Amino acid sequence: MQFKIGIGYDIHRLVEGRKLFLGGIEIPYVKGLLGHSDGDALIHALCDALLGAIGAGDIGQHFPDTDFKYQGIASSQLLKAVQEIVVSRGYRINNLDVVVIAQEPSLKPFKDLIKQKLSELLKLNPEELNIKAKTNEGLDAVGNKEAIACYAVVSLIKES
């Protein structure tokens, strides 16, 4: 059995006038994440982890922010497209682990919803993925409530 591992990272600035999306769900907050798409940093990190695991570059190569067809797109659509690339290479997700770093809003009430949404999008059993929410203890742009950052690690298994 062949395994592959990938890591992804993303950070987006928090701005007024946008909705906040993380893990494919809308989270009520006074600001949202700035981005060419819906700005879902969690899904962007996950896409990078998946693409990295199969040696297929990164999200910017596949969905460039210079292409207007991706303007405002739901990042969940990008994740589905990335998963199709992974499957076309003969792999499936074994498990994934995600860390969301946000000083505000508190993500504790939303972790189960995010896990459920990602399970549905990726057709995974909930025990095959984990979502962690952390703060930055008031340090840097994330700690100053100016941004949200995410890390994702994924392991893939080659389908026989």
Image: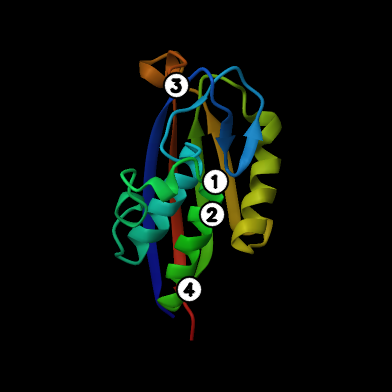
Q: Which mark is residue 87?
A: 4
The answer to whether mark 1 and mark 4 are in CB contact below 8 A is no
Residue 76 versus residue 34 in the image, above or below: below
Q: Is residue 51 left or right of residue 127?
A: left
Q: Nearer the viewer, mark 1 or mark 4?
A: 1
What residue is at 39 percent from the left and 15 percent from the top? 139
The residue where tag 1 is placed is 74
Question: What kind of element bears circle 2?
Answer: helix
- For the N terminus, the image quarter is bottom left
Q: Nearer the viewer, mark 2 or mark 3?
A: 2
Q: Which sits earlier in the primary sequence, circle 2 or circle 3?
A: 2
Q: Position of residue 140 (x, y in %)?
A: 35, 17
Q: Nearer the viewer, mark 3 or mark 1?
A: 1
Query: Which of the 4 image quadrants contains residue 10?
Result: top left
What residue is at 63 percent from the left and 62 percent from the top? 124
Disc 3 residue type (three-letter) = Asn
The residue where tag 2 is placed is 77
Q: Nearer the viewer, mark 4 or mark 2?
A: 2
Disc 4 residue type (three-letter) = Val
Q: Is residue 11 left or right of residue 128?
A: left
Disc 1 residue type (three-letter) = Ala
Query: Which of the 4 image quadrants contains residue 129?
Result: bottom right
Q: CA distance from mark 3 to mark 1?
A: 27 Å
Q: Which sits earlier in the primary sequence, circle 4 or circle 2?
A: 2
Q: Position of residue 61 (x, y in %)?
A: 29, 54
The residue where tag 3 is placed is 136
Q: Which sits earlier in the primary sequence, circle 3 or circle 1?
A: 1
Q: Residues within 10 Å of mark 4 (few under 14, many from 20)?
A: some
Q: Which sits earlier in the primary sequence, circle 1 or circle 4?
A: 1
The answer to whether mark 4 and mark 2 are in CB contact below 8 A is no
